[in-house]
Image (cartoon, rainbow, N blue to C red):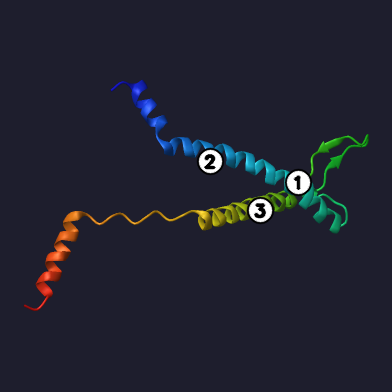
Amino acid sequence: MGMISEFKEFISRGNVVDLAVGVVIGAAFGKIVTALVDGIVMPVVGFISGGVSVSDWKYVLRPAQLDAAGKEVAAEVALKYGLFIQTAIDFLLIALVIFVVLKAYNKVRTPAPAPATPEDVLLLREIRDSLKKPA
């Protein structure tokens, strides 16, 4: 079997196509939730906390050093924890929405029908039941 025919067989399997669709939809969904967090949730949190953007929250370890002309000589050293908080909220919202969607999907999904009992098993059950009957 040639490499091209093996590749066609690999690609034509449902799992690969399903995985590709899931990755593309997941990436698009991540962008939607990120836009929600950046455009709606974080401005509200920033407004409540005094008008400063959450992504700008930081703890300055060493302030920037300026020369006599006011030009920056050494950049500030800061722990930017606000960006971490914003990314964590983004992740939690994505995880929450995925959880809710999967929960709804599992509720709607119909269970697979039970497989039919093989004929030989049915025959063996009949023999067993007939042997149990008193003569």
Q: Quadrant of residue 27?
A: top right
Q: Given the image, on which type of amino acid does mark 3 rest? A: Leu
Give the mark nearer the N terminus: 2 vs 1.
Answer: 2
> Can residue 49 be seen by looking at this rendering?
no
| Label 3 neighbour load within 10 Å: few <14, some 14-19, many 20+ | some
Residue at 89 percent of width and 37 percent of height: 67
Mark 2 = which residue? 22
Instruction: Please tell me whether residue 91 is drawn above or below residue 126 in the rendered image.
Output: above
Residues tagged 2 and 3 counted as in contact (Cβ below 8 A): no
Give the mark nearer the N terminus: 1 vs 3.
Answer: 1
How many callouts does the rendering have?
3
Instruction: Please tell me whether residue 80 is drawn above or below residue 4 in the rendered image.
Output: below
* Foreground pick, 84 / 103: 103
Q: Position of residue 102 (x, y in %)?
A: 55, 53
Give the mark nearer the N terminus: 2 vs 3.
Answer: 2
Q: Element type at marker 2?
A: helix
Q: Element type at marker 1?
A: helix
Q: Quadrant of residue 24?
A: top right
Residues tagged 1 and 3 counted as in contact (Cβ below 8 A): no
For residue 38, the mark is 1
For residue 115, the mark is none
* Foreground pick, 58 / 40: 40
Q: CA distance from mark 1 to mark 3?
A: 12 Å
